[in-house]
């Protein structure tokens, strides 16, 4: 079964976590495998930024066109802003074997199909495109020895690609940057959570700013943007976000709360085919949403933005293969103001009843995911807003967990994605003498599989880049996968005919 892909319009940015030792079978690798460097010659910071090096292992067979380049992160000079081009040391072992059509495997992040290679000064510039995991590994069985703790994840510096620094604005003006609020994250920053702590109450009024570096809505004359402030990973994954453009101001939070989050997996590949796969994410506890939106112009917005920060916790190699456990996130917000002066705010939290996992064997999937929820804080009770028109907000949030190879949206391997959609409306205040209608609809979907998926909008970006080198366009998906609707429930209050229509 082919992977189903959500119709995103921008890159999902990623967070990287290397996984544990495993057991396996199959033998040898590509000719001329160099030993990977170890010890103080490769700094921990370089490995976190560029990834760990692969090490030949007798129980793994690589595809014959894979070139394992020596030196790992120590061989990386820089990565271009487009993240397609890696500038490496031309003296690195096997670098002279790189050619268009080959697969470069330098680190767990620097892996892909070579589409161009050329000498530029003292560097070797290698442009690569995405590959499926079976384009790299022909035979091997990989199993996490114990659950991988995600709580120790830290941000990877300079993780955001230049082309991820845009958002889509339908009606709100031109696209804007998506730099992390507060100036981004650099080496040495970060912690259990990026962003201010949040308690049980709703966020403050739109336009507010916290003294401790919290959410700040840009001034109206700034470039329009949806600005996320990422949260990861001890208490869950999510983001606080702001928007200010054309008289529309928005502040919000979406959070997948997690308690001691861990990941575990099993992956068996034989003859470049996935034979068996299992992937489990433990610790998901609740979903929380806070939103406050106003307009003074009647304008509406429809931006969607990735979270442009990687998070990483290095653990070790997997039979010499530097897999990574990653989290990618996308947030989309659509407003529906029915009057020039409109506002709507709400807070909701729902407990989840299960962890998230899937199994694949004999061509079939089984999945375990939250199929029912319980209300901890009622969204319906909190929806407020005063306007002469009907006002609404639609939020979609995508949290995708991966185990595989690659970075910055090009991750191939196992994945499990939880998608939240939440719509809410409040009726016109003109109806107050009779009734003010409120409505909300919460939906949850799970998508899972083994392979790769690239957001639809990003496929066009990648293929435009590939055309510069006369390379073949890539499909937006490959591998095996499936998806399942977990929960979908509309609620109307009061439940009377005038509100149901």
Image (spheres, helix red, strand yellow):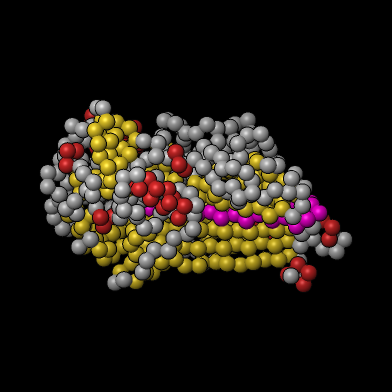
Whether residue 163 sits left or right of residue 315 in the image: it is right
Count of numbered circles on the image:
0
**Outermost right residue:** 433
Whether residue 389 sits left or right of residue 304 in the image: it is right
Residue 216 at least partly seen = no
Magenta part of the chain: 383-403
Q: In the image shown, does 351 or 106 lie closer to the viewer?
A: 106
Whether residue 379 sits left or right of residue 27 in the image: it is right
Residue at point 70% right, 58% down?
425
Residue 391 highlighted magenta (yes or no)? yes
Q: Position of residue 273 (x, y in %)?
A: 25, 63
Residue 167 highlighted magenta (yes or no)? no
Task: Identify whether 7 is placed above or below 243.
Answer: below
Residue at point 45% right, 42% down?
163
Residue at point 75% right, 44% down?
296
**Outermost top residue:** 122
**Dominant SS type (magenta):** strand
Q: Position of residue 420 (x, y in %)?
A: 54, 58
Figure quadrant of the N terminus: bottom left
Q: In the image shown, does 494 or 315 lie closer to the viewer?
A: 494
Q: Position of residue 418 (x, y in %)?
A: 48, 58
Q: In the image shown, does 225 or 72 lie closer to the viewer?
A: 225
Q: Position of residue 131 (x, y in %)?
A: 30, 52
Residue 267 at least partly seen = yes
Figure quadrant of the C terminus: bottom right
Residue at point 36% right, 58% down?
475
Task: Identify whether 217 is placed above or below 298.
Answer: above
């Amino acid at each position: 079964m082919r992977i189903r892909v959500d119709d995103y319009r921008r890159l999902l940015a990623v967070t990287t976590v290397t996984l544990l030792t495993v057991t396996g079978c199959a033998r040898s690798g590509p000719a001329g495998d160099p030993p990977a460097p170890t010890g103080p010659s490769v700094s921990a910071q370089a490995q976190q930024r560029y990834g760990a090096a692969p090490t030949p292992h007798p129980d793994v067979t690589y595809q014959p066109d894979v070139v394992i380049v020596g030196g790992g992160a120590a061989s990386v000079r820089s990565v271009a802003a487009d993240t397609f081009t890696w500038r490496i040391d031309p003296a690195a072992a096997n670098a002279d074997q790189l050619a268009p059509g080959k697969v470069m495997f330098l680190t767990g992040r620097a892996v892909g199909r070579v589409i161009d290679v050329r000498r530029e000064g003292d560097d070797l510039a290698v442009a690569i495109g995405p590959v499926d995991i079976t384009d790299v590994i022909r035979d091997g069985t990989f199993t996490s020895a114990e659950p991988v703790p995600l709580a120790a994840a830290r941000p990877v510096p300079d993780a955001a690609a230049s082309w991820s620094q845009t958002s889509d604005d339908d009606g709100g003006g031109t696209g804007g940057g998506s730099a992390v609020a507060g100036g981004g994250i650099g080496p040495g920053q970060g912690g259990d959570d990026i962003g201010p702590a949040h308690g049980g109450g709703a966020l403050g009024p739109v336009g507010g700013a916290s003294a401790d570096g919290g959410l700040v809505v840009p001034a109206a004359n700034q470039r329009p943007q949806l600005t996320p402030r990422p949260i990861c990973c001890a208490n869950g994954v999510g983001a606080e976000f702001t928007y200010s453009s054309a008289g529309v101001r928005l502040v919000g939070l979406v959070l997948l709360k997690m308690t001691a989050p861990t990941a575990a997996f099993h992956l068996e590949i034989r003859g470049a085919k996935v034979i068996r796969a299992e992937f489990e994410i433990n610790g998901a506890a609740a979903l929380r949403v806070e939103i406050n939106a106003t307009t003074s112009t009647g304008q509406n917005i429809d931006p969607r933005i990735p979270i442009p920060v990687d998070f990483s916790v290095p653990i070790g190699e997997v039979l010499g293969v530097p897999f990574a456990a990653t989290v990618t996130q996308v947030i989309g917000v659509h407003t529906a103001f029915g009057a020039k002066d409109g506002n709507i705010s709400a807070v909701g939290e729902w407990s989840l009843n299960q962890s998230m996992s899937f199994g694949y064997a004999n061509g079939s999937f089984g999945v375990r995911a939250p199929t029912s929820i319980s209300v901890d804080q009622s969204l319906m009770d909190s929806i407020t807003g005063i306007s002469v028109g009907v006002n609404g907000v639609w939020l979609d949030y995508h949290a995708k967990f991966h185990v595989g190879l690659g970075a910055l949206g090009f991750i191939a391997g196992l994945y499990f994605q939880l998608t939240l959609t939440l719509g809410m409306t409040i009726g016109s205040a003109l109806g107050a003498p009779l009734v003010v209608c409120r409505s909300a609809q919460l939906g949850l979907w799970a998508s899972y599989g083994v392979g790769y998926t690239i957001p639809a909008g990003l496929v066009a970006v990648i293929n435009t880049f590939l055309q510069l080198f006369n390379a073949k366009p890539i499909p937006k998906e490959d591998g095996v996968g499936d998806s399942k609707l977990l929960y979908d429930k509309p609620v109307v209050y009061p439940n009377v005919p005038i509100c149901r229509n």
